[in-house]
Amino acid sequence: MTVPRRTMARVFWRCLFLQAAWNRRGMQNLGFAYAIEPALRALYADPARREEALARHLRFFNCHPYMAAAILGGAIHHEEQVAAGAEPGGAALDYKATLQGPLAAVGDGFFWTALRPFFGAVAAVGALVAGWPAIVAALVVYNLVHAALRLGLFRAGYARGDGVVSVIARLSLPRLAGWLRATGALLCGVALGILALRGGPGAALAGVPAIPLVAAAAGYLALGRGVRLLPAAYGAAAAGVGMAALAARFTGGGIHP
Amino acid sequence: MIPLVRVDNRLLHGQVLEAWIPRLGARTVVVADDAAAGNPLARAAMTLCLPAGVEARISAIAAVDFPALAAAAAPVLVLVREVASVLEATGLGLTPAMAPVVNLGNVHFAAGRRALTPSVYLGELELALLRRLADAGFRIEARALPTEPPIGLTELERRYLAAHPG
């Protein structure tokens, strides 16, 4: 018993909205149940069994939203076995419960703390060199990489079930993350260098270019003193923008690329 | 030494690896969980998510030598799945002198549990177990991340009484 390709495409589309109904009690449970529902409809003709299957996917679930695609694919892999009577009803649940934590860690470590900051740094350097279109380009490329990996993970999960772990292991994401972080840091240095060269020696540490440095440093100090993450981050960003607007007013111009 | 024993229904995930391990300077995580220890998929997935230089030991609670972990010079983070698992560990020799802080990271909703923090749901049973741990000398704190302010047991008990059932 297998899920038709068209239905799988619908499931993948729906998994892009995994966090749309995020809630404290079940976290991504509603999003997951919504995404897998077309597949359950295809697998369980009997309404009672279909309802039972949907109910089990309403249990707690939380993972990195991209990596969750692998688990969603794998859960359908297991549901096919359950529908065929080859596995007990809880097989997909055990699979989800086992993988959600470790794959969340992989996703946080790769996407949130490496790939996204890397493309942020690319966008910053690109904006200094080529203006705002570079920011759009960086966003587009980031999302191409994101979408390709997300779709690949979904397909690998569906095709391999438990074997998706070895597929992810072969991607060597932690090693790649280390490289992306180092290169991202280098690009931030390059951005500062460009600012310094444009404004003459010492300019990077005086005037407008110093503002993001001061704002970031203040944010880090606040974090070190136990201030909560979001207030510190938003406070630092707002202070940076405010100071930059003031500085632009006093120096008589905007921040030109 | 064991700077932190963390109760987390999801065991090893991003909050532990990205926030707590660097904060504690730990190079070793001990996942003390019978179900994970007996599950090859869980073992493979947990090994997969470790950053370079961090080691995970996944074993059944009864197989963990808590005095040895406490005696080692390097800080070790101990992860358990449920509040009751901490009590089980005390039965196996874990004392407040070895591990002064019990952290409640993520304890999911279940029947009879009330929302006490965004990530911690506790019922009367869990609160009674935590009170026993506190009376034994453990410091109980609820917080998902080290950047959040710790919430103590007295405050959790107050919130339980103030919270709506369910």
Image (tube, coloured by chain):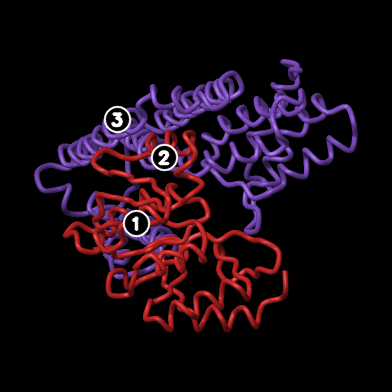
Chain colours: A purple, B red
Type of the residue with mark 1 = Trp
Q: Position of residue A12 (x, y in %)?
A: 66, 27
Q: Nearer the viewer, residue A255 or B7?
A: B7
Is disc 2 placed on a helix, strand or loop?
A: helix
Query: Relative to B106, does residue B60 appear above or below in the rendering?
Result: above
Assess disc 3: are there few (<14), some (14-19) or many (≥20) residues with their C-alpha within 10 Å of its C-alpha: few
Query: Relative to A53, does residue B84 appear above or below in the rendering?
Result: below
The residue where tag 3 is placed is: A175
Question: Residue placed at 62% from the left, 68% from the top?
Answer: B115
Q: How many tags in the picture? A: 3
Q: Are marks 1 and 2 on the same chain?
A: yes
- Distance in Å between CA atoms under marks 2 and 3: 16 Å
Asked if the residues shown at circle 2 and circle 3 are in contact, with their CB atoms under 8 angstroms apart, the answer is no
Q: Nearer the viewer, residue B146 or B46?
A: B46
Q: Position of residue A28 (x, y in %)?
A: 63, 47
Question: Residue placed at 52% from the left, 34% from the top?
Answer: A67
| Chain ID, mark 1 | B
Assess disc 1: are there few (<14), some (14-19) or many (≥20) residues with their C-alpha within 10 Å of its C-alpha: some
Residue found farthest to the right: A47
Indicate which disc residue B20 carries. Answer: 1
Type of the residue with mark 3 = Arg
- Distance in Å between CA atoms under marks 1 and 3: 20 Å
Among the two numbered marks 1 and 2 on one chain, the one whose residue lies closer to the N terminus: 1
Q: Position of residue A256 (x, y in %)?
A: 32, 40
Q: Position of residue B153 (x, y in %)?
A: 48, 79
Is disc 1 placed on a helix, strand or loop?
A: helix
Indicate which disc residue B146 carries. Answer: none
The residue where tag 2 is placed is: B46
